[in-house]
Amino acid sequence: MQALMQDSPLTIPQLFHRAERQFHDKRIVTTTLRGEVSNTYGEWSTRVRRLATALDGLGVPQDAKVATFAWNTQSHLELYFAVPCTGRVLHTLNIRLFAEQVAYIVEHAGDDVIFVDRSLLPMLWPMADRLATVRHFVVIDDGAEAEIPDDPRIRHYEELLASAEPFRGRFEVADENAAAAMCYTSGTTGHPKGVVYSHRSTVLHSLVSLTVDAVGLSERDTILPVVPMFHVNAWGLPYAAVFAGSSIVFPGPAMKPEALVEMLERHRVTTTAGVPTIWMGMLPLLGEHDLSSLRVVVGGGAAIPTALSEGWRAAIGIPITQAWGMTETSPLASVASPRSHHEGLDSESLIQVRATQGQAVPLVDLRIVDMDTGAEQPWDGATPGELQAAGPWIASAYYGDEGSDAFSADGWLRTGDVATMDEHGFVRLVDRTKDLVKSGGEWISSVELENVIMAHEWVAEAAVIAKPDPKWTERPVACVVVEQGGQLTADEVYDHLRERVAKWWLPDEVWFVDELPKTSTGKFSKKDLRERLLGQSQ
Ligand code: ADP
């Protein structure tokens, strides 16, 4: 027997129309280089409607990829909605990537147009001629003075909006499984890969962010997403915030700890989220501010050191709530807040609970499997296995069918994280199968860095490993074997790298070694290197 319920697709237009009708008086504040700009959801929604018409006016095809190269701002939120509400695909470009990678990603996705904050134009424009698919560069005025080239491809965001009539009526997207947005993620080998989110996955992911055991976002919250909108859609929080009708404070380019803590205080922010490096930077400033409005501080993207979480608790009364996820998991997959079975634990044990990666949120399934046999491992809190994930907002493949080895035979995502799980499903990460360096919440591909170093004529071999770092979580260290008869100094390695990789990718140290340990299959054994050079057991 079939059920007798209406079959309404789960789409981003539903989030938009709800906010427009019910929360038109709620506020969206953005820090710009000219100071703060405050608008209502009502004003924002009219601009979303204008932008929808403007995209048609620009001749952007109905299913085109529309890229953004932008900070966390109201205009970025306009794009977050106008693009998918008109059936197009929002493609957020990571502004921290090196030019080569951005160019590769834009070409791979086939972006038709890029919306770029004026302050970021000097980073993007030098590669404009290589971005063959891009017909327009729409510059968003964020108060920066950066020069705007005189070029027919350049358009101006405010002019486009002013000359476009607001779209009338309801946005309709018939197929909830249609693509809504995409983000690229760094792989262990090869090029970055595209993760493609659907309307349905975005709505369900937002809905779960509103549940109390996840983030519990509500209409009464004021949220400040520190995590960038160019990195996994700011963990989906912009969509969740609009769904809930929360007030939003966008930091724009003001990402310094002093500015952020000031914003948290001034706007009586209740909910915020970011990577541990951000919370580390703010820790020494907390005592000077009244942050009593804060209800939850979410930390993720890398492990939250207990000293950091406890430091926040000592300063403002609440610890950091650890969450785990990946670009491929939209990203919210598990959250570590104590449950009723933890009641009565002493404070040290509770600290250990919060130091886990937590329990899967509703609709996400997690399991650990033996890396050799593929057999599922027991949830005994001790046996490690590769962490795998399944659910309606977990990727089933990458764009262009690349990287199929990231998925198990029965369709689960192989996360590349190694974990134990306890009897209630609390996950504890113990290692990573992927050899990437996570610095300040962003990836540095050790493989790419090695390839660049090995391109130097006097380098025989090079391996890059992650060194734990109190501020950035991890920083790269390069181990270099010099060609026989050759001579090389660390300065020469740096000079070589400076011309080829982003500044923040430069290894903290360059170590010269006689040889690199190898695995049985002839790959550099980073495990052995780490043990030998950093004294780590893993
Ligand atoms: P994001 O940085 O937004 O989480 P990425 O796809 O860039 O997304 O990185 C995902 C990876 O980051 C995970 O596979 C894991 O290795 C690491 N990671 C994410 N959250 C945590 C966490 N809470 N603790 C430890 N590592 C984490």
Image (tube, rainbow, N blue to C red):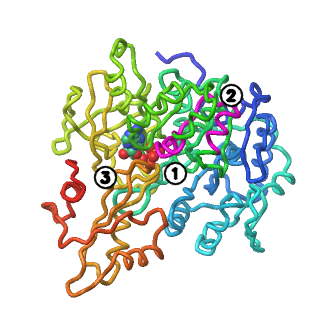
Tell me the element at label 3: loop
Query: Which residue type does callout 2 highlight?
Result: Gly
Query: Which residue type does callout 1 highlight?
Result: Cys
Q: Which residue is mark 2?
A: 245
Q: x, y (%) of residue 153? A: 73, 69
Q: x, y (%) of residue 434? A: 31, 52
Q: Residues within 10 Å of mark 2 (few under 14, many from 20)?
A: many
Left or right relative to 241: residue 150: right
The residue stretch that appears in magenta: 259-283
Left or right relative to 408: residue 531: left
Query: Which residue type does callout 3 highlight?
Result: Lys
Which residue is outermost to the left?
Answer: 520
Q: Which residue is mark 1?
A: 183
Q: Which residue is mark 3?
A: 434
Kindly report the distance in space between the C-alpha atoms of the residues bearing marks 2 and 3.
Answer: 38 Å
**Label 3 CB, ligand 1: below 8 Å?**
yes
Vertical comparison of 122 with 350: above or below:
below
Asked if the residue under mark 2 is in contact with the one under mark 1, i.e. CB atoms within 8 Å, the reply is no
Of 167 and 161, nearer the camera is 161
Residue at 63 percent across and 33 percent down: it is 289
Viewer can see residue 327: no
